[in-house]
Amino acid sequence: MPLESKRIAALLLTEPNASTWKQAIEVDNILQKDTVGTAIRQSILIRKRLATLDAAAWTLITERKRSHQSTALCCRNQTKQVVGRFHAQCLRKSPAEDGT
């Protein structure tokens, strides 16, 4: 679900209200699912996982290279926000970017 997670992360960055969320998931079908029910279920699952991360991590998921996305998506599975924040801080600057 990396592509779907990327789309949900981008939506979360806009701080959507309930009607905007419903429009994106059910009407615009940003997850490109065959049924509305599937789109709703998957969006709830991904949103709960991404809720353990902060906006900086969501930005990484939406804008960075695939390796960064995979790492950020792995830490979304953590249930404690502390772990998610730690991973997000580690990912803010990759070794290639800081010269190490």
Image: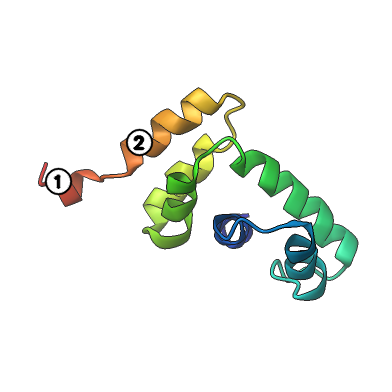
Is residue 8 rendered to the left or right of residue 99? right
- In depth, the one of 65 and 29 nearer the eye is 29
Q: Picture coordinates of residue 45 (x, y %)?
A: 74, 45
Q: Which mark is on residue 89?
A: 2
Where is residue 38? Give x, y as percent.
84, 59
Give above or below for 95 relative to 17. Answer: above
Q: Residue furthest left?
A: 99
Residue drawn at (38%, 50%) of the image: 68
**Local crowd size for mark 2, using a 10 Å CA cut-off: few (<14), some (14–19), many (≥20):** few
Q: Which residue is mark 1?
A: 98
Q: Please rate how many residues cluster around mark 1, counting C-alpha atoms within 10 Å: few if below 14, some from 14 to 19, many from 20.
A: few
Whether residue 37 sits left or right of residue 63 in the image: it is: right
Q: Amino acid at mark 1?
A: Asp
Looking at the image, which residue is at 72% across and 57% down? Answer: 17
Whole-number angstrom distance, CA of label 2 to CA of label 1: 14 Å
Q: How is the image coloured?
A: rainbow
State the SS at label 1: helix
